[in-house]
């Protein structure tokens, strides 16, 4: 395996390697701008899903119905096995919003209180104020201000990282890259240092691209992909993932910062509101999110959809009935898969994906 695949399949080891260079700045959400953590001199990373059989440290602080992603992320940070200098999270679902209160006193935490409704000038004003509040809180915890020169460089570098991940999924849709490779790219981008990631991503992908021809073209929609093994499982059932709508994949990589903006902090804040593709945790006017997804699925020739939800508490569950109905109207059948503590799909869930594929093929 090359360095992207290694980092994607063992993100904790990748973070441990970076922790040797300095304290980590851990983000619990793709809405936390890592370039800001870079500017504080932290080894900034967005923590991927870390499936775990048990989360004893978090279990003592969180309610039992909290999703595995949030519980495992908190347990990882509380373990103190890596040098965590700061944890940053963004408001969103109830668990994410409550994290700072839950972990108060246990970890140095800064919260980004983004607006729920993300359209209009009031959302922009709130996002700008929220980013400055988060930076002030982080500065108080760390005892220093962010380096403005580093911030500008990091903003450009992180933009290239997100663009490369977006490009990878475009190559999947065009049949030039296997979906597994695109998700390896996305997961590695979360934990590798930007320069190291870009160097690794510039190398040719190992092995030939797998053509989706002859297989059912699938949309994968949901919050976080538990691991590359989940993608391998879906494709082993005869599907070809050609379109992504997950935080791990295209949504997390969609943010764009205006390079010509007069104030870099305002530009970063604006990118969190109207510069990225949002999931259901943010509110768009009307059916904007669902209509966009259906249009993209039709353009990509999608024949089926796999909706990947975290068990217990997942904002995607609230939109699932409307999304399922919209997919059905577009003649795209779907299956809803719940993930919990496992890094791959269960045999039962793989059988459900295979049944969906066989009903179409």
Image (cartoon, rainbow, N blue to C red):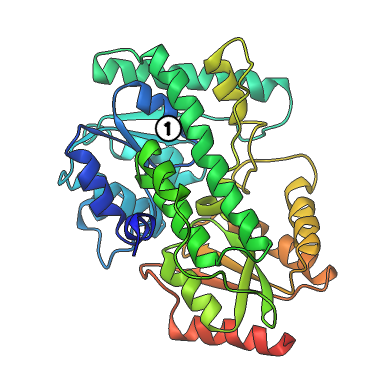
User: Which residue is identified by label 1?
Assistant: 34
Relative to 359, residue 276 above or below: above
Left or right for 252, reference 324: left
Is residue 77 visible to us here? yes
Front-most of residues 277 and 8? 8
Q: Position of residue 176 (x, y in %)?
A: 62, 63
Q: Position of residue 75 (x, y in %)?
A: 25, 51
Seen at 54% across and 53% down, the residue is 249
Crowding at mark 1 (Cα within 10 Å: few <14, some 14-19, many 20+): many
**Residue closest to the far front:** 204
Front-most of residues 164 and 71? 164
Seen at 63% across and 31% down, the residue is 273
Front-most of residues 3 and 187? 3
Seen at 55% across and 67% down, the residue is 178
The quarter of the picture where the C terminus appears is bottom right
Q: Position of residue 348 (x, y in %)?
A: 48, 85
Left or right for 85, reference 1: left
Number of numbered labels in the structure image? 1
Is residue 61 visible to us here? no
Front-most of residues 120 and 256? 256
Q: Name the element at disc 1.
A: helix
């Amino acid at each position: 395996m090359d360095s992207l695949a290694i980092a994607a399949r063992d993100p904790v080891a990748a973070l441990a390697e970076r922790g040797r260079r300095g304290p980590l700045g851990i983000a619990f959400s793709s809405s936390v701008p890592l370039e800001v953590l870079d500017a504080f001199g932290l080894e900034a990373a967005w923590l991927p899903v870390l499936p775990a059989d048990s989360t004893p440290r978090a279990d003592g602080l969180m309610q039992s119905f909290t999703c595995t992603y949030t519980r495992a992320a908190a347990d990882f940070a509380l373990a103190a096995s890596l040098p965590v200098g700061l944890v940053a999270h963004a408001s969103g679902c109830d668990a994410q919003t409550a994290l700072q209160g839950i972990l108060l006193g246990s970890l140095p935490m800064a919260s980004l209180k983004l607006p729920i409704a993300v359209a209009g000038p009031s959302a922009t004003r709130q996002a700008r104020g929220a980013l400055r509040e988060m930076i002030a809180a982080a500065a108080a915890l760390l005892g220093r201000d962010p380096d403005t020169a580093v911030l500008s460089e990091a903003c450009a570098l992180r933009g290239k990282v997100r663009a490369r991940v977006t490009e990878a999924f475009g190559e999947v849709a065009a049949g030039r890259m296997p979906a597994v490779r695109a998700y390896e790219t996305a997961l590695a981008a979360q934990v590798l240092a930007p320069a190291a990631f870009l160097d690794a991503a510039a190398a040719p992908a190992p092995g030939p691209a797998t053509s989706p021809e002859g297989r059912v073209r699938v949309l994968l929609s949901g919050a976080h992909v538990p691991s590359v093994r989940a993608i391998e499982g879906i494709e082993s059932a005869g599907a070809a993932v050609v379109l992504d709508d997950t935080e791990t994949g295209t949504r997390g990589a969609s943010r764009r910062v205006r390079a010509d903006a007069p104030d870099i902090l305002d530009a970063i804040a604006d990118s969190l509101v109207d510069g990225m593709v949002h999931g259901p945790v943010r509110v768009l006017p009307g059916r904007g999110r669902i209509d966009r997804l259906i249009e993209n699925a039709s353009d990509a020739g999608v024949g089926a959809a796999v909706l990947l939800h975290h068990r217990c508490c997942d904002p995607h569950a609230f939109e699932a009935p409307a999304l399922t109905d919209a997919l059905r109207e577009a003649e795209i059948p779907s299956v809803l898969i719940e993930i919990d503590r496992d890094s791959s799909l269960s045999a039962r869930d793989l059988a459900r994906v295979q049944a969906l594929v066989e009903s179409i093929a």
